[in-house]
Image (spheres, rainbow, N blue to C red):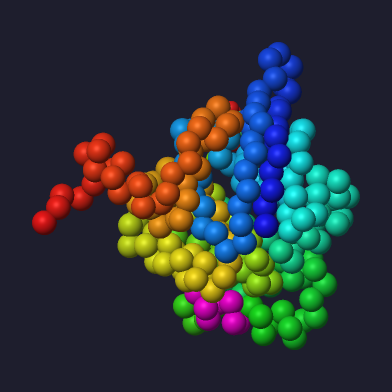
């Protein structure tokens, strides 16, 4: 589904260029669940933005479902993003003055989905995250976990095949975080391709595969199940029976 070849993303702010991504080549198959880890500044968010077509590589190619998206005009990219990709951010990025329902409808407004269908899809998406009864609430009237579940409803309302999440539990306590992770697992079980950026080994171990970034490169590839051993080795795992 995803084919990156020698992808670079370079920032030039005068002075030395910063290579946020420094030659990443990677394939992610449809239906995979991949976690991206790595120290702060290693390029995790930049990579996710490139995968989500929110940012373009400076060099290299990105093929999504066989199509080179680096060649697409902005309009075509926005259309593709709206239909095929969902994005979940650490800080939710909901519109404060809009209800949960209106937030979920927003991407469909941009895509020109008729009003009746918007209503129907938004209600179904909110029901799927267990928040239909909160649909008239504004973000400020919801807990952090509920806000993130509204954000997941918004990200999945067009039934994208690819869902990208950047530290989706970074602002949540462990109970709310677990609820969000269970939802993501459920979406993955239903067939969505899931890529999650996290610094939390507990989050990453749910993934089938873990990419560890360092200085804009893939420094290691692990199986999600290998992280249990890693945590124990670091003395951070839960004590055994
Ligand atoms: N808009 C930007 N302008 C300049 N440099 C940036 C910008 N965004 C990110 N960077 C730099 O690119 C590198 C990777 O950043 P980022 O992808 O946000 O890392 P991570 O998410 O792993 O913490 C960092 O050195 C960061 O300072
Ligand atoms: Mg980041």
**Residue 121, percent across and down?**
66, 80
Measuring 49% from the left and 82% from the top, which residue is drawn there? Answer: 133
Quarter of the figure that contains the N terminus: bottom right
Does the magenta portion include 19?
Answer: no
Residue 145 sits in quarter: bottom left
Measuring 73% from the left and 23% from the top, which residue is drawn there? Answer: 12
Q: Is residue 165 above or below residue 113?
A: above
Query: Toward the viewer: 110 or 86?
Result: 86
Question: Is 121 on the left-hand or right-hand side of 202?
Answer: right
**Residue 211, percent across and down?**
50, 43
Does the magenta portion include 126?
Answer: yes
The part of the chain drawn in magenta is 123-129
Extreme residue toward the top, this view: 15
Query: Toward the viewer: 199 or 170?
Result: 199
Q: Is residue 163 above or below residue 14?
A: below
**Residue 106, percent across and down?**
71, 68
**Residue 195, percent across and down?**
55, 54
Number of disc labels: 0
Query: Toward the viewer: 133 or 65?
Result: 65
Q: Is residue 144 visible?
A: yes
Residue 46 sits in quarter: top right
Measuring 76% from the left and 36% from the top, which residue is drawn there? Answer: 60
Q: Is residue 99 visible?
A: no
Extreme residue toward the left, this view: 241
Quarter of the figure that contains the C terminus: bottom left
Secondary structure mostly taken by the magenta-highlighted segment of the chain: helix
Measuring 65% from the left and 29% from the top, which residue is drawn there? Answer: 22
């Amino acid at each position: 589904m995803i084919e990156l070849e020698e992808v670079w993303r370079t920032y030039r702010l005068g002075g030395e260029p910063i290579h946020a991504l420094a030659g990443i080549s990677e394939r992610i198959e449809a239906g995979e669940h991949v976690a991206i880890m790595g120290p702060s500044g290693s390029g995790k968010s930049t990579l996710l933005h490139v995968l989500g077509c929110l940012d373009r590589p400076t060099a290299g190619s990105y093929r999504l479902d066989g199509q080179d998206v680096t060649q697409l005009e902005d309009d075509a990219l926005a259309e593709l993003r709206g239909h095929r990709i969902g994005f979940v951010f650490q800080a939710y990025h909901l519109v404060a003055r809009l209800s949960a329902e209106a937030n979920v409808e927003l991407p469909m407004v941009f895509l020109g989905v008729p009003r009746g269908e918007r209503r129907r899809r938004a209600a179904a998406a909110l029901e799927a995250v267990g928040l239909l009864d909160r649909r008239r609430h504004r973000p400020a009237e919801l807990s952090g976990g509920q806000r993130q579940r509204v954000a997941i409803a918004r990200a999945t309302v067009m039934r994208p095949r690819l869902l990208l999440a950047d530290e989706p539990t970074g602002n949540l306590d462990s109970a709310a975080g677990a609820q969000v992770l269970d939802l993501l697992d459920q979406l993955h079980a239903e067939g969505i391709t899931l890529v999650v950026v996290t610094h939390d080994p507990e989050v990453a171990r749910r993934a089938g595969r873990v990419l560890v970034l360092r200085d804009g490169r893939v420094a290691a590839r692990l199986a999600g199940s290998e992280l249990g051993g890693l945590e124990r080795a670091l003395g951070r795992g839960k004590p055994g029976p």
